[in-house]
Each structure stands twice: as structure tokens, then as C-alpha cells.
Image: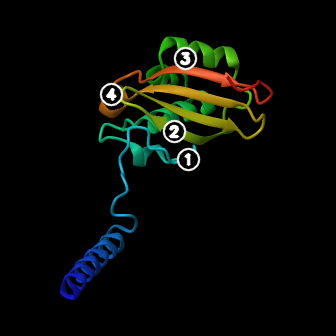
Amino acid sequence: MNTTFRNRAAALSVAAIAGFAGVALTGGSALAATNSAADSGSGAEVNVASDAHSDGHPRNASGYADALVKAWGVGSDEEVNEYATPGVVEALSEHGDEHAASWDRIAADGAAESSSVVYKNKVTGELLTFGVDNKAATHGLHPAVHHVQFKDRTQPSQ
């Protein structure tokens, strides 16, 4: 029994050392997923060029939403039309762009077919949620952003 305990302890020690080596080599958790459909990192100040395919298009849902927010913020109607469906383009136009350059991504959550990417306006406190088709975003197909919802900070949660 004493030998069995030592063998198990030795095996666990080797596994722990291998795990730590994996963390050291990858710079983070060896078990962490690095390429989700939503890419749930925050901050709309994401460099779109680093989240792009070789053809210049984003490679995930949050990248597409970020590109749309940036295009809207600088008034690039051509790019807005490229990334979003006509209904989303119309909703953005109706909303107006007075504070369009003041959005920060605060969340992204993905499912099999679609991801939600949420932004908060630094000036108004308003929330903006985009629905993004994961397959279209992953393959650089246009338009990938198919849904938009604005929520004033004074509106109750639904």
C-alpha cells in the first residue's frame, strides 16, 4: 500500500510539472480555448487588422461587430452596408450617430449559430447588442451582423 501511494504521488507530481510547463510555454492556461466563435474579450478598441483573415475581413463574431462599430463611428456607410443586413443598417441610421464613436465592447457570448456582442456607450450609458451569424463571420461572408438592439440605461431588463 505504501508503494502504491508513492507511485500515485510521483505520477501526480509529473502531471503537475507537465501542466506548469504547458502554462509556461503557452503564456497562459494550457486548457484555455483560444478561438471561440464569439471571442468574448472586451474592449471595442480591438485592432481590426489583427482579427482579420488574409482578405482583410474579421474572423469571428466580435471582430465583425467591432468592425461594424468602427465603420459606423467614422461614418463609413459602405463598410456599414458590407458588415450588416439592411435591417441593421436602417436601425443604426434611425438611431443616429451623435455618439457613434463612443462604444466599448463589454461582452460577447456565442452559441452554435449566432453570437451576441454587447457594447456600452461611454457618453450616454446606452447598451447596444448585435446578433452575429457565426458561420458567416468565420468564413468572411457578408453581411454577418443580422440583429441590433439598443437599450437605454433607464429601460428595465427584459
Instruction: Give the mark nearer the N terminus: 4 vs 3.
Output: 3
Query: The residue tagged with tag 1: helix, strand or loop?
Result: loop
- Which label was assigned to residue 108? 2
Name the N-terminal-most of marks 2 and 3. 3
**Residue 120: quadrant of the picture:** top right
Give residue 15's position: percent from left, percent from top: 26, 74
Q: What's the residue type where badge 4 is placed? A: Lys
Label disc, if present, on residue 88 of the rendered structure: 3
- Is 101 displayed left or right of 52 in the figure? right
Out of 1 and 95, give the one closest to the viewer: 1
Q: Position of residue 94 (x, y in %)?
A: 67, 14
Q: Disc 2 vs disc 4: Cβ atoms closer than 8 Å?
A: no
> Looking at the image, do the residues carrying marks 2 and 1 touch, with CB atoms under 8 Å apart?
yes
Please tell me which residue lies in front, 91 or 33: 33
Residue appearing at x 45%, y 38% in the figure: 63
Task: Tell me which residue sits at (27%, 77%) in the image.
Answer: 12
* Crowd around label 3: few <14 · some 14–19 · many ≥20 (10 Å): many
The alpha-carbon separation of the residues under discs 4 and 3 comes to: 18 Å
> Label 4 neighbourhood size at 10 Å, few (<14), some (14-19), many (20+)?
some
Quadrant in the picture for the C terminus:
top right
Classify 141 as above or below 46: above
Q: Is residue 93 left or right of residue 16?
A: right
